[in-house]
Amino acid sequence: MRLAAWIFALLAVPAQAAPSEFSAPLDITPEQPGVFHQLDSAGRKHIAVSGDTVAVVWEESRGGVSQVTVAFKPLSANVFSLLRVSGGATAGVPVVAPLGGGRFLLAWEQDGDLHARAAEAAALGPAVRLAQKASQPSLAVLDGKIVAVWSEERAGYPRIRIAHLILDGQRVSVDGAVRDVDVAPPKAEQLYPDVALTPAGVSVAWEDRREGHTMLLHTFSKDGQCFSKPKILNEQPTKRSEVYGKGTGAARVALARHGKRGIVAMWLDKRNFLEGYDVYAGFARDGTRFGRNEKVQDDFGGNISQWHAALAADSRGRVAVVWDDDRDGTADLWLAWPKGAGQWSESQPVPIASGPGQQSSPAITFDAAGNLHLIWVERETLEAPTRLRYAVGRSLYN
């Protein structure tokens, strides 16, 4: 039965064509002394396209104080406009989701609590606190339904929580009760969740340490209220490692809708501990049952670690994964896409984010036309200030 489900999942992933050229990069923010930008939120949902507008959200440190900023740009323009999102003493780990018609939803941590607000290029809606002692938010939107997940301190451990959100004009509020996605009594930390919506229901995945090491769990709900018993997403080794014990060390899972009803998951995985982190993925055609894990990057990147892997997918079945590694001496961005039957393309350098200097921490999203929008952090050296850059791959797939 498992073999049949695996074959079914593989056949559901169509082959994709090679990417086309990316546009010349644009600066979202310039390089400034003492200013550092971070793109490191749960699910790496730092960029979204809504209507004819692209939005980018990030954490920015000035003088050791971090705040959240959002930038907007019409797809046809070459300049971003910036707005401060957060207040308080410190803020970070922001995410953005498209609401349609040039509107967006933002969520972030501020002074230890979780906040959200609607946003568009002209103005920001009021900031609303969604939860206390909470962090690492992620968002998903589909056909007017809005879902938020986060990690919240409860009963001595961070727990993954979920809420349905509604908008009254520009004001965000929670619709109904906030729930645990895992009803079992807490035993260890649950961190860095991500969420995806399909017509079939809600899928959630996260980092879990109940077995004494970090593994990835996922669960599904038809109504977003009653969730299935969590299952392990990253395949476990059959033998105990002297370095990692029974586990492998998996981190930073991302989820996205794939096709009409499917889900694709992507994460970093140390199952081959001599190589450090590798990029892995899995597909669930029905949104609930994942097939075999698939290694994303090629063997040429097998001797070094991959970092900051980001995922993009859409309802037409497009999928792209991008990450940074230093196989050529400095951190560059690399791109891969599924070829079908469990195979992925050779890893391709992103030309406009490779070469001298450090190019890292990417985030990506598709627009309705299939163009791939890319952002990343760039600096001359590891000690230098950073800047944020943006480019788009036109008609990336057939």
Image: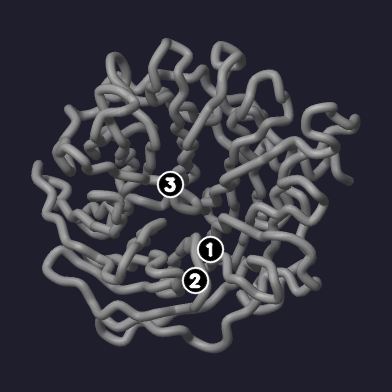
Q: Is residue 17 visible?
A: no
* Element class at badge 1: strand
Residue 27, given in percent of the width and then of the height, sits at 16, 37
Residue 29, given in percent of the width and then of the height, sits at 17, 43
Question: Dividing the picture into quarters, in which one does residue 161 lie?
Answer: bottom right
Give the residue pinned by disc 1: 197
Question: Dividing the picture into quarters, in which one does residue 177 lie?
Answer: bottom right
Kindly identify which numbered label has been placed on residue 40. Answer: 3
Q: Is residue 72 above or below residue 249?
A: below
Residue 23, given in percent of the width and then of the height, sits at 20, 29
Would you call the spot at circle 1 few (<14 residues within 10 Å), some (14-19), or many (20 or more)? many
Residue 394 horizontal side relative to residue 361, left or right:
left
Viewer-proximal residue among 217 and 127: 127
Residue 92, given in percent of the width and then of the height, sits at 37, 58
Q: Is residue 218 visible?
A: yes
Would you call the spot at circle 2 few (<14 residues within 10 Å), some (14-19), or many (20 or more)? many
Q: Is residue 87 above or below residue 379?
A: below
- The CA span between labels 1 and 2 is 8 Å
Marks 1 and 2 close (CB-CB < 8 Å): yes
Q: Look at label 2 and name its amino acid.
A: Val
The residue lying at 90 percent from left, 30 percent from top is 239
